[in-house]
Image (spheres, coloured by chain):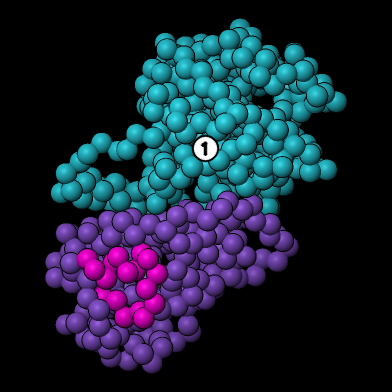
Chain colours: A cyan, B purple
Amino acid sequence: MPETITYPGARRPDRQRSVDASGLRIAVHEWGDADAPPVLLAHGGFDFAGTYDVFAPLLADAGWRVVAWDHRGHGDSEHAHLYSWDADVRDAVAVLDSVAPDGRALPIIGHSKGGALMLQLAEALPHRMTKLVNIDGMPSPRPHPDVASHERTKLMASELSGWLDYRRSTSELSRKPGTIDELAERRGRMNPRLSKEWLRYLVTIGAREDADGWRWKIDPALRMGGFGPYRNSWSLERLSGMDHPMLGLLGLVPEQMGWGTNPDELRPYLPPNGELIAFEDVGHFIHIEKPKEVAELVLDFLGTPA
Amino acid sequence: MITLLHGRTELALHELRPGAASTRPLLHLHGLAERSPDTAPAVYDAWPGPVYGLDFTGHGASTIPKGGGYTCEMLMADVDAALAHLGPVTVVGRGIGAYVAVLIAGGRPDLVRGAILRDGPGLTGGGITPTSPYVAVVDPATPTPPDPWALAELTRDPRPPDYATSFVRQAVHFSDLAEPITVCAIGRPAWLEAVVHEPGVRVATLDEALATYAA
């Protein structure tokens, strides 16, 4: 039996199932009454649905059927051969279709990368979304810091060869095993503001126990960073073009996993029905640091479950 | 056929024409929805060394992944799997293979001894910015190459000109060759128009390019 660790306010999903997303198995986790009005909940990169174990029950207890899923390669979802932004959006639509097969529109909440993915969904399939809550996943208008071109060439060379070296190793990679404390400590380096108790709790959900120790379930072929032709300005245009009511939350304390978005710089790009609320003394994981405050704002924004 | 492992994908590398181990191989990168030819095309007759062809992920005899997720960066890593096996090569790419040839020339300037860019399917890509987002639907019940997801996704990948030229600059900065990239293509999508104006990029015929890099 895997070790059980509890955390104050954390509740495992009431139901778990999977959907077939163009041949790939995506794990879906639901909290709340199965007949209640649904709301979709998208997690961030390198997270998993279980990181909503405190936040989601607060919405469920207010009368919502909260539907979260593990992105491909994350949590309990199948590891894929390939990963891309568009593929993640497509997987989200498979989950959406499983909740609203009649093509109905739903309110959607996304954190970090999940929030940015849902901005793309809002543009691609506006008729499937009623409202959007974006928790610290809005693009930063700030251009990259000025770097001399010869420095940039050197930086890019090490980035490129580093990434290619990593790809060469991906067929043999596995996550490093460890104790619950060791995994919590490693995770803590990316989440320095989250408590050790919370991180230990997350290990028991986001990791599995093998004979030689615990391992994070996330596909070892996934790696932070990376590169591509993506530009922040593309997402900013997407944000401005939205017609849906949007509640944007920003955590202002800079963090490695955060995007460093400045509210004053972002405000000109907000959609006509967009509202921005910044948390001064909170980091990237606003809904984990302040679950009750965030749930209150979100419930107020969503209105009566319908 | 040689099978190479890239992540969970098995890539097919074909020896199209044998050659002395002492001579540098020519590596053919096919266009979008194409596959490696079975034998070396006659246009490569002037190449003194062996000729290989790589099937990209989802193409030819390579694995068709579940549920797509294609990017040109991942095709670049496909080529790197071939470089890990072959060592230094000259690459020649058609269409999307030409774009990927620029990426890998910048990513592995020590292993790509010249990149030759030819016309072919997928030369343009999705333009210089993303097109309006679209959620493609593909019937997963027809897993024959080329993977329909590769076509759905790699016809839409944005290719900003300054992104392409950043790879050219890597290639030129770190390569021993004065002109590590040669453009034989007639087509000039925006990314390639920018590439031909970079120092270290030459416009020439295929025969001239092969003669230069064979020397």
How many discs appear? 1
Could you tell whether A189 is left or right of A298 in the image?
left
Label 1 chain ID: A
* Mark 1 secondary-structure assignment: helix
Q: Is residue B59 left or right of residue B110?
A: right
Residue A26 in the figure: left or right of residue B167: right
Residue in view at x 37 percent, y 66 percent: B190
Name the foreground residue: B158 vs A51.
B158
Residue B12 in the image, given as x and y percentages of width and height = 48, 70
Q: Toward which corner of the image does residue A204 lie, by quadrant?
A: top right
x, y percent for residue A127: 72, 42
Q: Is residue A212 visible?
A: no
Rendered position, A38 above or below A83: above
Could you tell me which residue is drawn at 28 percent across and 86 percent down? B205
Amino acid at the residue labelled 1: Ser
Q: Which residues are magenta?
A: B180-198
Question: Is B197 in the magenta?
Answer: yes
Q: Give x and y (percent) for residue B132.
A: 56, 53
* Tag 1 residue: A240
